[in-house]
Image (tube, rainbow, N blue to C red):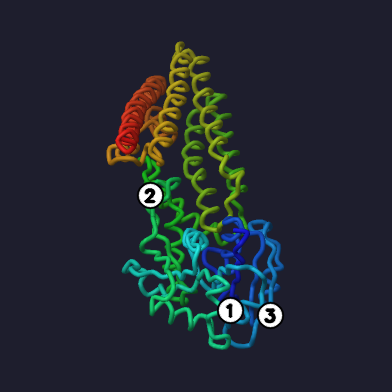
Amino acid sequence: MGNVLPILIADDPEALVELCGVNLLERLLRILQRLGFRRALVLSTTPEIIGAEVAKRSWARQKVIVYVVPGATGPLTPQLVLEQGESERFLIVPADVYCDPRLLAALCARDSSAALVDSNPPEFARFLIRNPCGPALVTKDFLSAFSTTTPFFQQLKERVDNRKIDIVDAAAEDHYIVSMRRRVRPFCFPAPAEQNRRLAERVILDSAQKGTLDLPAYIHAPIETRIISLLCKTRITPNQITIAGFIIGCSATAAFAVGRVGFGILAALIFGIVDGLDGKQSRVKIETTERGKWEHHLDYLIENSWWATIAFHLWRSGEFPNVFYFLALLVGSHLLDEFAKRRAKMAKGRLLDDVTPFDRAFRLIAARRNVYVWMLACGFLLGALPQTYAVICGWAAFSAAVHLVRSICICHGAVRSFVAIRS
């Protein structure tokens, strides 16, 4: 992004409208950092207010150096843009809009000037959308052809209407996100009116929800979203939520180790909900970090400590003398399952759980932590904990076998397609 200079047009109060606990200007600056930008200009007719906002410490955009430039008393003009630097390309974004990061990335990927539009917004969000949406990538040569005195956005709209500039259409962009296992419709809309703010926040909250879930996660999802709708308006960070989850997870491990199985299962059930909150909080508030991507390794360590301490409890109590053989089967099945999923992703470019309708249906009940915990809860209530543990280990082996077969089929299909293309 080194050859693109982002310029945000920020005026009070529109740019400081908060959605899900983050004002629109701050949200855009956080997005710019995650797109790889390290500096940005903010043009404003209210530089004192905007400057005070930008000066506030924000770890989520600390890598971006922001320069607040007092603007003219009127609307933005091409001349004012050209005066801001020697860059050959400018990413011009009104700071009073919510914009999906993928749309800004699509603009930056263009070699020529382009404006963002949304030709077919969903019915429920149609009254939120403005066309053109506002953000645009313009080259210095393209901008030089503009009238120096006529407002920039007025001239941009005329060129969009007359098809004299390329467009990036939000409706035509690829909606599928591999890591989310679902299609997430990208939006760009201006600061909503007070009566529409709840709908705008619902759009943001929905975009943070992953798809293709296991059965327990479908019950967790609305609970998590409701909690995040409250947490996002606090100063609680995703890392703090992760630490809280770690404490709850360790509490479950300790409870299993001392034989308090009921308390351990309750803590594990709570962990199942808390574990989904940190990721949602980071996506909703644009607080993702590289360290956060390793959080699932910590989860894996915690959940394996559960299976090990439950096995230890069952062995020590004499209820299941051969339990460690089953624990070895469980761990081995998990390793085989990860291998199968990794190979499928390399061949297909998406997660194995979301390749076909069969894979999505099987994930509902496939061997996973949430499914195990629910099975343990039922087994504990029925007084059949040893038998349930054995069933869990067997189900892990069966799920791994299914995924291995599916991985082989997917990889074989990918090889045949490659050979057909080469021939």
Decide if residue 118 is on the left or right side of residue 135: left
Determine the image quadrant of residue 39: bottom right
Residues packed near mark 3 inside 10 Å, few (<14), some (14 to 19) or many (20 plus): some
Asked if the residue under mark 2 is in contact with the one under mark 3, i.e. CB atoms within 8 Å, the reply is no
User: x and y percent of residue 86 in the render?
Assistant: 66, 70
Residue at mark 1 to residue at mark 2: CA–CA distance = 35 Å
Residue where numbered disc 3 is placed? 70
Q: Nearer the viewer, residue 153 or 204?
A: 153
Looking at the image, how many numbered discs can be counted on the residues?
A: 3
Residues packed near mark 2 inside 10 Å, few (<14), some (14 to 19) or many (20 plus): some
The image shows residue 216, relative to residue 183, as above or below, that is: above
Please, what is the three-letter code of the amino acid marked with disc 1?
Pro
Decide if residue 223 is on the left or right side of residue 305: left
Asked if the residue under mark 2 is in contact with the one under mark 1, i.e. CB atoms within 8 Å, the reply is no
Decide if residue 62 is on the left or right side of residue 362: right
The image shows residue 381, relative to residue 240, as above or below, that is: above
Determine the image quadrant of residue 15: bottom right
Is residue 150 something one can see in this rendering?
yes
Residue at mark 1 to residue at mark 3: CA–CA distance = 16 Å
Is residue 383 something one can see in this rendering?
no
Residues packed near mark 1 inside 10 Å, few (<14), some (14 to 19) or many (20 plus): few
Precedes in sequence: disc 1 or disc 2: 1
Residue where numbered disc 1 is placed? 13
Please, what is the three-letter code of the amino acid marked with disc 2?
Arg
Precedes in sequence: disc 1 or disc 3: 1
User: x and y percent of residue 269 in the render?
Assistant: 46, 39
Q: Secondary structure at mark 2?
A: strand
Precedes in sequence: disc 3 or disc 2: 3
Quarter holding the N terminus is bottom right
